[in-house]
Image: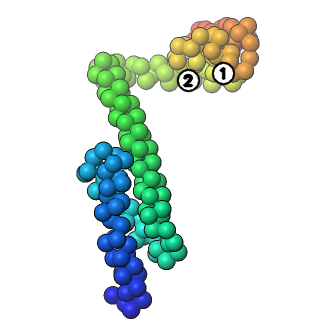
């Protein structure tokens, strides 16, 4: 430890001993769980330790501690929400995979069909290709496709007819 670290360590020690009990109590009341309060109290002091400049510029320790702790609470809530969303999507994916139990041969046939469709659609105009894919692969209604592409429903029908004719001619050859 260098001589320059001594005042910092003393400041951290003083901040911790004077305010840790109060911060823990505030967090416990706010969170309703002593374990989470202890974790966030620890994280708050760790965040302050990581920012040496903040420690030196601190005028109101309790206000600074509560602001830091609130930011950590928000970060934790966001992280939990993101983790929850991820876990729900993962469970849904697993459920779909279990329902789709395809053999390797079925998967190969499906991939070959998709590759052939992609090859045939390659010669189409962009809107016609998008309308075809949105209608036949994603199952969207013509009105939804019209809104998404910014065109009329009549134009969607025209694109779908052109795409089907294009596919028919491409597969007849």
**Toward the viewer: 34 or 151?**
34
Q: In this view, does 112 lie above or below 153?
A: below
Relative placement, left or right, of 172 versus 45 is right
Relative placement, left or right, of 48 versus 127 is left
The 10 Å Cα crowd at callout 1, few under 14, some 14 to 19, many 20 or more, is: few
Residue for badge 2: 118
Q: In this view, does 54 lie above or below 82?
A: below
The answer to whether residue 141 of the structure is visible from this angle is: yes
- Of marks 1 and 2, the one in the foreground: 1
Residue at 44% x, 64% y: name it: 62
Q: Picture coordinates of residue 25 (x, y %)?
A: 32, 55
Q: Picture coordinates of residue 6 (x, y %)?
A: 37, 87
Q: Picture coordinates of residue 142 (x, y %)?
A: 63, 10
Residue for badge 1: 148
Q: At numbered mark 1, what does the secondary structure look like: helix, strand or loop?
A: helix
Q: Picture coordinates of residue 79 (x, y %)?
A: 41, 45
Q: At numbered mark 2, what does the secondary structure look like: helix, strand or loop?
A: helix
Residue at 37% x, 47% y: name it: 30
Relative placement, left or right, of 31 versus 63 is left
The 10 Å Cα crowd at callout 2, few under 14, some 14 to 19, many 20 or more, is: few
The answer to whether residue 128 of the structure is visible from this angle is: no
Residue 102: assigned label: none
Q: Which residue lies furthest to the left in this view?
A: 35
Marks 1 and 2, Cα distance to the nearest angstrom?
21 Å
């Amino acid at each position: 430890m260098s001589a320059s670290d001594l005042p910092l360590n003393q400041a951290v020690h003083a901040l911790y001993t004077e305010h840790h009990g109060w911060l823990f109590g505030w967090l416990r009341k706010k969170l309703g769980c002593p374990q989470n309060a202890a974790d966030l109290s620890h994280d708050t002091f760790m965040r302050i330790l990581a920012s040496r400049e903040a420690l030196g510029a601190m005028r109101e320790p309790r206000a600074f501690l509560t602001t830091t702790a609130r930011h950590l609470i928000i970060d934790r809530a966001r992280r939990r929400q993101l983790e929850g969303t991820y876990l729900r999507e993962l469970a849904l994916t697993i459920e779909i995979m279990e329902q789709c139990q395809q053999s390797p041969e079925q998967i190969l046939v499906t991939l070959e069909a998709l590759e052939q469709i992609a090859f045939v659609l390659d010669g189409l105009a962009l809107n016609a290709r998008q309308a075809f894919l949105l209608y036949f692969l994603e199952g969207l209604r013509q009105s939804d496709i019209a809104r998404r592409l910014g065109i009329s429903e009549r134009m969607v029908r025209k694109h779908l007819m052109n795409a089907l004719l294009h596919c028919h001619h491409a597969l007849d050859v």
